[in-house]
Amino acid sequence: MSVPVVGVLALQGAFVAHERALRSLGVSTRQIRTPADLANVRGLVMPGGESTTMSKLLDSSGIFDEMDRLLADGFPVFGTCAGMILLAREVLDGRADQRSFGVIDIGVRRNGYGRQVDSFETDIPVQGLSAPFHAVFIRAPKVERVGDGVQVLAQYEGVPVLARQGNVTVASFHPELTADARLHEQFLRHHDLI
Ligand code: GLN
């Protein structure tokens, strides 16, 4: 069987580090910049960056509509930080024209961890991992509501920071910024990609 190709949305943001993590686990990666790039891709990582900018570029590139179709068919996606915002059902403190796919039943507040702690790092226990994960939060979205169908995989101070619903996994933090690829591995294994 050939090695699966996993896409990394490369319109803007922290996509190169995600590619490195995915490749270290034995899959091929492809940078996604046009709808055609999504052909034959078996899953997608949506990186951190700036969700308002990414929303605009998703629209203007035509990727939004293609992804919308794929997501409705159960396409596996892992959204981190800005990627989480773009997948959430409700976005608080977003820009009026900002769009999201609404495929995971959570409400998130952009930059919800507040100015004074814009960025911080902490070790968090994660369901399915035997040792804590070092999580880097950068102007991170804060989850304020979680629907019944959402499985919370990790929390920080009682607030969900890693969650999954069906084909959609989201993290408030940046799992690609440490040398630890266990969350990418968990995503790929969950979808039988490795
Ligand atoms: N605050 C950013 C946004 O609203 C997300 C930050 C990040 O991805 N590191 O999109």
Image (spheres, rainbow, N blue to C red):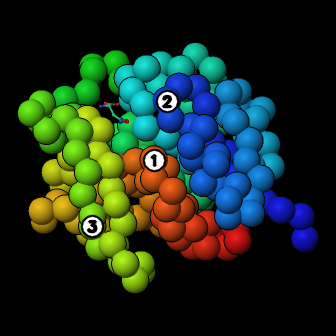
| Marks 1 and 3, the one that precedes in the sequence | 3
Quickly name the residue at label 3: 124
Residue 128 screen position, x and y as percent:
42, 80
Q: Residues within 10 Å of mark 1 (few under 14, many from 20)?
A: some
In which quadrant of the rendered view does residue 114 lie? top left
Q: Do the residues labelled 1 and 3 touch (CB within 8 Å)?
A: no
Q: Residue 81: x and y, percent? A: 37, 43
Identify which amino acid the numbered label 1 is placed on. Leu
Q: Do the residues labelled 1 and 2 touch (CB within 8 Å)?
A: no
Instruction: Give the Cα separation between the discs numbered 1 and 3.
Output: 15 Å
Decide: few, some or many residues near mark 2? Use Cα within 10 Å; few <14, some 14-19, many ≥20: some
Q: Distance between the residues labelled 1 and 2?
A: 12 Å
Q: Can residue 109 be seen in this view?
A: no
> Quadrant location of the N terminus?
bottom right
Indicate the secondary structure of the residue bearing disc 3. Answer: strand
Q: Of residues 36 and 84, which is closer to you in this image? A: 84
